[in-house]
Amino acid sequence: MIPNTSCYWLKNVRVPVCVLKNRDAAIANSANNDGMAVVDVKIASEIIEQIVVSGSVESGNIATVDLQGRQIWPCFVDVHTHLDKGHIWERSPNLNGTFEQALTATFKDEETWTTEDIYRRMEFGLKCSYVHGTKAIRTHLDSAGRLTDLNWDVFKTLRKEWENRLILQAVSLATLDYYLTPEGEKLVDKIAESGGILGGVAYMNPELDQQIERVFQIAKDRKLNLDFHVDENGEVESICLQKIAEAALKHQFEGQIVCGHCCSLAVQPDDVVQHTLNIVKSAGIGVVSLPMCNLYLQDRQYDQSQSPKTPHWRGTTLVHELKQTGVPVAFASDNCRDPFYGFGDHDGLEVFKMAVRICHLDRPFEDWLCTVTKTPADLMGLPDVGRIGVGLPADFIVFKGRYLSEILSRQESERLVIRNGILITESLPDYTELDSLI
């Protein structure tokens, strides 16, 4: 379908107006109720050279393909993953589905990790992401004890090997108290040397204020961005997001701050919620919701005989309220086939589909598509990624579906991924590649 030439037109294409860079008024005004405009796109020498209202420009002698109204999206941006944990489910399952059991199973599995084991599982995740249409990934790396060197060294190797296909970023993952120790200081050196992001798990404890203070001091001194795991629970009293926002304002922090999960916000009183939303907006914090993992883990309930009970809430944070307040909201894949989430395939479309259904993002769809493309790219400091525009690399996904209802209803396993104007030919890796690790 895609011409094997450096210059061609894609005619009669539906594109989400919300992801167009420097869109003109004629295209914006032609959008339908789902925010899709019908356009023609010219690709030349790996770059998008023109985007015009469909039928307004003659293609001349240039190769042309009529996509008959199919949609094209920019490549996905996955801003919160755990590639180092990925694909250990078969050897370390979470038998009761709780967060506590996920921690126990993961800690035990980590005792066996080697450079080869981490490399092969992380590479498997990268292969899946690339074939599904992802362009940029931020992964959290467990970063305490021996795992610091293991995980970060493997990450740096893969970042170099994949630099022409995927943009990779890494975040340290340790409890915040770790940064008060000599080992924490060594970790900070590793992060800075690796061009990483300072991150950690914030949880309510008597020393939390001191821990947050120290992390902000380090980030300012080293000029590091911040990325936290925050309030991944259903506890009303868990207000780590609020405390981080207060610290950001106190320190007048100029770097980018991202907070993932923020689940407890959904169960807190309205006055607490409104105060938190306001200061999060003032602090310029971006929030990442992980709909698949949090639906899986949160509100797991058992009766006295340890029989499972139906959950009462969906586990996700207040994405509508955050977005309405002006807080950047993104969705991401989080864990994949590990004790924290036993499923997943590193697919941005699956993430978006689940987010739409769990969080009621449909009718109107508005610009929610930005949450897996443009917005996470901005949070990662990638202003030309996650969007489609004249002068940008011809990186996008061609779906078979013409309308969002079609794309969100089928697997779209026949999607075409275009990178630098060329159709990629790789296939999803077979699970047998990991058999020797199980």
Image (tube, grey):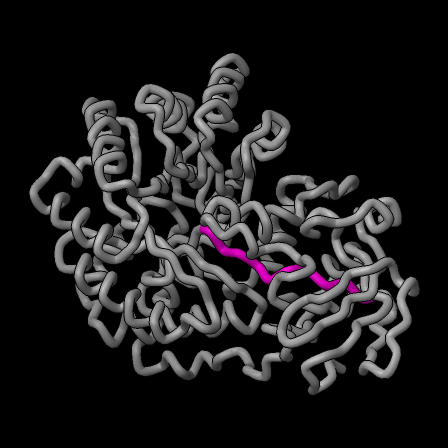
Q: Position of residue 73 (x, y in %)?
A: 68, 60
Image quadrant containing the N terminus: bottom right
The front one of 172 and 144 is 172
Q: Main secondary structure of the magenta part?
A: strand
Q: Could you tell whether 248 is left or right of 31 in the image?
A: left
- x and y percent of residue 362 in the render? 74, 43
Image quadrant where residue 264 sits: top left
In the picture, which quadrant includes the C terminus?
Answer: bottom left
Identity of the residue drawn at 62% across and 62% down: 392
Residue appearing at x 38%, y 57% in the figure: 169
Q: Residue at x 84, y 70 (%)?
A: 11
Q: Residue furthest left?
A: 182
Image position of 300 (left or right of 101):
right
Asked which quadrant contains residue 422, the reply is: bottom right
Give me the residue at 65% from left, 61% from top: 391
Residue projecting furthest to the bottom: 4
- The magenta stretch spans residue 297: no
Q: Which residues are magenta?
A: 70-79
> For residue 71: magenta?
yes
Q: Position of residue 199 (x, y in %)?
A: 30, 43
Q: Do we see residue 201 in this rendering?
A: yes
